[in-house]
Image (cartoon, rainbow, N blue to C red):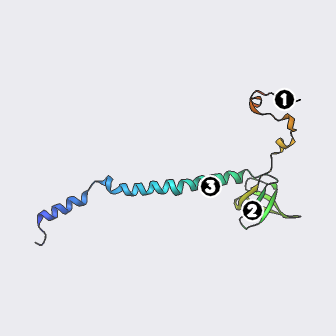
Amino acid sequence: MLISEAMAQQAGAAGGGDLLTSFLPLIAIFAIFYFLLIRPQQKKQKEHQAKIAAVRRGDKIITGGGFYGTVTKVISDTEVQVELAENVKVKVATQTIMDVLSKTEPANDAAKPAEEKKSGLGALFGAKKKEDK
């Protein structure tokens, strides 16, 4: 025989090794990829979806086709009406909105006079802001 029995036994024992030590580098690489690539991308995607879901009338947006426009009407969760130019209105799927460039103030805050707005602890207890005289 070309290979002695001692060499064959030694080669068999070396190949068996500890299973954990052989998979440890793969586990470490996956953990690095998860924390550096996958997790930040998921967070960015959730933020984008929340931004698109909060689109309302008056917001300036950019579509996937590169059109800049102003939202004139929110038709449904999946559709908005956008004014691209004067008297040019189109329906756009919310999935195609790439970014919200500027947000408008909510209608209920804009309607309140400045002196009626509450601040600080007064907002917690329902007290109105006092005027300085």
42 horizontally vs 48: left or right: left
Q: Which residue is mark 2?
A: 62
Q: Which residue is mark 1?
A: 130
Counting from the top left corner in percent of width and height, residue 33 is at 48, 57
Q: Is label 3 in a helix, a strand or a loop?
A: helix
Q: Amino acid at mark 3?
A: Gln
14 horizontally vs 35: left or right: left
The mark found on residue 116 in the picture is none
Sequence order check: which comes first, mark 1 or mark 2? 2
Q: CA distance from mark 1 to mark 2?
A: 42 Å
Q: CA distance from mark 3 to mark 1?
A: 43 Å
Counting from the top left corner in percent of width and height, residue 54 is at 73, 50
Is 93 located above or below residue 111 in the figure? below
Q: Amino acid at mark 2?
A: Ile
Residue 62, image quadrant? bottom right
Residue at 87%, 41% in the rendered image:
111
Q: Which residue is mark 3?
A: 45
Sequence order check: which comes first, mark 3 or mark 1? 3
